[in-house]
Amino acid sequence: AQTVTQSQPEMSVQEAETVTLSCTYDTSENNYYLFWYKQPPSRQMILVIRQEAYKQQNATENRFSVNFQKAAKSFSLKISDSQLGDTAMYFCAFQGGGADGLTFGKGTHLIIQP
Amino acid sequence: GAGVSQSPSNKVTEKGKDVELRCDPISGHTALYWYRQSLGQGLEFLIYFQGNSAPDKSGLPSDRFSAERTGGSVSTLTIQRTQQEDSAVYLCASSLVGPLAGGTFTDTQYFGPGTRLTVL
């Protein structure tokens, strides 16, 4: 079974700063997918970024980028020029090759201070 | 286009009652997923449908939980004889296609707003 670990329950940074959220995972599979989802107080889970394990290049989406280290099984999310609207719970998720859903970490509550 | 919708948004019920939660996936999405989000357990995967069939139901917490999907679209999650530990947010997601064996492909899951279930 896969596990996903997010070691930072809560983080707080000032607006416009850069912040990095950590995620490590454990799997014996070689082909898999990793995701970061954002969940604001509205409860809606929103996809932030996605990474295919077979791709060496790190995914980027505007202010969001990942540092994917396959050998270390690490998948951190960097948010540049943070904005107040980035305040939310952030979940790291793993999708393997079985007929299963996503395996989520416990989440990191990110607070952007004005 | 419209996203994943779920109803009701909130449901309060008494212990021992049955409840039905509904999910309307994005039009054309063949795969549908149910998750449960609770303070104690975090986000747990419950069940996945490809079309109308669920390959694996082992993620359902107990035999009081059942799910069905008809016409390849709407799905209902039914909880019989609800218990207080069933209190949680139930999230539904859909994707264009489901995961293929061997991890060769997976499609992004898009989530609904969830149903908050409170069992008194």
Image: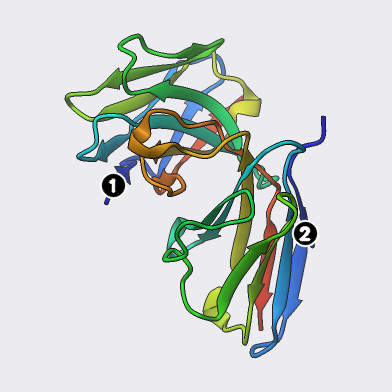
Q: On the picture, is A113 further left or further right than A52?
A: right
Determine crowd level at label 1: few under 14, some 14-19, many 20+ residues with C-alpha closer than 10 A: some
* Above/below status of A95 relative to B45: above
Q: Which residue is mark 2?
A: B9
Q: Position of residue A10 (x, y in %)?
A: 43, 41
* Above/below status of A79 relative to A90: above
Report in which chain the residue with disc 2 lies: B
Residue B57 is at least partly visible in this image: yes
State the residue in front, B81 or B28: B28
Rendered image: mark on residue A2 = 1
Residue found farthest to the right: B1
Identify residue type, mark 2: Ser
Q: Residue at x 40, y 49 (%)?
A: A106
Query: Where, quadrant-wise, is the N terminus of chain B in this rendering?
Result: top right
Report in which chain the residue with disc 1 lies: A
Q: Residue at x 30, y 11 (%)?
A: A56
For label 2, the SS is loop
Identify residue type, mark 1: Gln
> Mark 1 near mark 2, Cβ–Cβ under 8 Å?
no
> Toward which corner of the image does residue B16 lie, by quadrant?
bottom right
* Above/below status of B61 relative to B100: below
> Toward which corner of the image does residue B10 lie, by quadrant?
bottom right
Rendered image: mark on residue A40 = none
Query: Where, quadrant-wise, is the C terminus of chain B in this rendering?
Result: bottom right
Q: Position of residue A52 (x, y in %)?
A: 39, 22
